[in-house]
Amino acid sequence: MKDLIKIGIPAKGRLRKFVLNIFKKNKLKLISSRGDRDLFGSIEGKKDFQIIYSHAREIISRLADKSLDAGFSGLDLLKESEINIQNKIKVYKKYPYGQATLVVAIPEDFIDIFSMADLEEVAFEFKDKKKKRLRVATKYPNLTREFFYSKGVTQFSIVKSIGSTEIAPYTGNSEIVTDITSTGSTLAANNLRIVNDGYILKSELCMMVGKSSLRNKKLLKLLKLLSKY
């Protein structure tokens, strides 16, 4: 049905479980005819709504292109997206869940680096002595680039990571990383430490709505209900 109001929910992981719990706490029963692996669902008693289970990153894109009306995803993924995408999306509700911070982390043997200013000096030395730029492995190239420039660090290159970013310095892929962490334990376990002023962004689970759908009264009524947690 063309006029269905479409809501995006993360397809797997802890975010999915938390979002499903939000619906459950508000006495909204989600139905998937083919079980947990079904990528489509509905809300019992609300025939105007369709649930679509997608990757958290894809939810951001689909809110921007209007194929979703609302959805749940991380603030980090929204802020990493292009500005023209961000401008089409409104954060309607932030939840105290999925809280993590995007940070700059360096190997423990970088004993002279404690601040981004120190990192800038090392980056210049690296270029002068090794004739190449300091490499930063990350899944967040846009946020990383913006943060480094804001701190006056310009002599670096981005290495896009698709796997375990924290091992990049030890596999020859990069010298340092930026990575999302909730406790810092995984970074520490891989002999990485966070630069003192290397905190890029605090993230959490958000309920978002496409700005083009903000006039839909049925949608806003549901969003208001889901804001109660």
Image (spheres, rainbow, N blue to C red):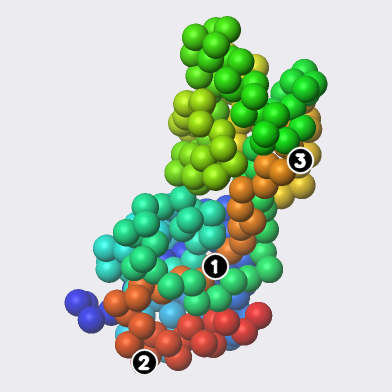
> Which residue is at the front of the view, 166 or 34?
166
Tell me the amino acid under the disc marked 3.
Answer: Asn
Numbered disc 1: secondary structure: strand
Secondary structure under tag 3 reads strand
Query: Is the residue 46 above or below the residue 67 in the image?
Result: below
Q: Earlier in the sequence, mark 3 or mark 1?
A: 3
Disc sitting over residue 196 in the figure: 3
Distance between the alpha carbons at the discs numbered 3 and 2: 46 Å
Residue drawn at point x = 55 percent, y = 76 percent: 93
Q: Quadrant of residue 220?
A: bottom left
Compared with 185, 80 (above or below) is below
Which residue in the structure is indicated by mark 2?
217
Viewer-side residue, 48 vs 222: 222
Circle on res. 206: 1
Is the residue marked by circle 1 packed among few (<14), some (14-19), or many (20+) residues within 10 Å?
Answer: many
Rendered-image quadrant of the C terminus: bottom right
- Locate residue 184 relative to residue 46 in the image: left or right: right
